[in-house]
Image (cartoon, rainbow, N blue to C red):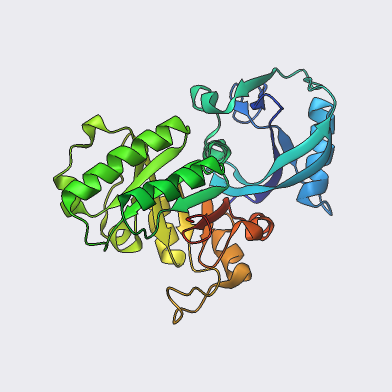
Amino acid sequence: MPDIIHVAVAVIINDDGAVCISLRHKDTHQGGLWEFPGGKIEQFETAQQALIREIKEELDLEISESRPLIKVLHDYHDKKVFLHVHRVLSYTGQAKGVEGQKVEWIPVDELSSYEFPLANLPIIKAVQLPDRYLITGKSSDQDDFLKKLTSALDRGVRLVQLRLKGDNLSTDAIRSLIQKSSVLCTQANAKLLLNISKDHLKSIDLSTVAFDGFHADSRMLNKLSSRPEGVLFSASCHNQDELQKARQLDADFAVLSPVKKTASHPETEPLGWQQFSDLVDGCTMPVYALGGVSEEDMKDAWSNGAQGVAAISALWH
């Protein structure tokens, strides 16, 4: 079995919202494919130190600030790599291919049009996801629901789970909320995922509604044998087995909870940040921290391997 090679990888996005990628030389491993720049972590180096050194050597950029984005463990059979990916927050200089490699800046939403090594694919998902994931909560009526959703979108939320379960809503009411939420999210350029019972979905024609995918709660996750095709798919997880099931189904991302004590489930023992970190380490898909967290916990979430925070009460007001 090959040793694991630890690699520091940089996601560098400029002021125009374009991300820096480079073309691997054809005579290298995975040659001829595009990649996020970076390189091997040397002995006695931290991932952060390797990132700064490698980006200077490869692109002649000076990194002044970065944060963790995702960790990816991938087995190429002839080589195992563990990618320590950081999102670069500030840098100086003009990127150039110091080692003769081709370098391009491309819009984030065009990344899927380029051919990358398989180990880089989870990075693309992480780059294209925001750091806040809103799960819709309770409301007094439809007007109140739409007012709260509009407020969240106005505050910059760009990923929404429309959760309509256990609210004793009629199919007509759910259909109306889906349609109106779709319009609001489309106008805000936000992604909309549906978390709605199968019984209601059977009675609703979604072909006329703009939405981006589906979210499965842990009960539904454990029943699934395949994921919905052609759309985003996310899942709720509470332990290692459920995270593994989400990975087996090739979920685009997951939420892991509860990180902290919650008023809604006070009897549930929270994971805490250390256990959260242990569970998502090398999980190879973006994972949001959920349960008792808010935007104030964002730095803790990032430092413990989370894509960001998912929340109901903290974002739904």
> To which quarter of the image does residue 66 belong?
top right
Residue 95 lies left or right of residue 239; in this view the side is right
Q: Is residue 83 left or right of residue 133?
A: right
Q: Is residue 49 above or below residue 105?
A: below
Q: Total label count?
A: 0
Please state the horizontal and vertical placement of residue 282, each as a whole percent of the image: 58, 54
- Please tell me whether residue 228 is drawn above or below residue 271 in the rendered image: above
Image vertical order of residue 229 relative to residue 74, above or below: above
Single out the residue that lies furthest toward the bottom.
Answer: 267
Left or right relative to 299: residue 242: left
Q: What residue lies at 71% left-to-right and 27% top-to-bottom?
A: 15
Residue 243 visible, this angle: yes
- Image coordinates of residue 312 in percent, x first then y, are 46, 59
Residue 117 position, x and y percent, is: 55, 32
Front one among 276 and 43: 276
The residue located at (29%, 45%) in the rendering is: 177
Q: Nearer the viewer, residue 30 or 2?
A: 30
Q: State the residue at coordinates (42%, 37%).
A: 185
Q: Residue furthest left?
A: 203
Query: Residue 241: horizontal and vertical position, in percent?
Result: 41, 65
Residue 250: tell me if it is visible. Answer: no
Q: Is residue 259 above or below residue 173?
A: below
Is 66 on the left or on the right of 248, as rendered? right
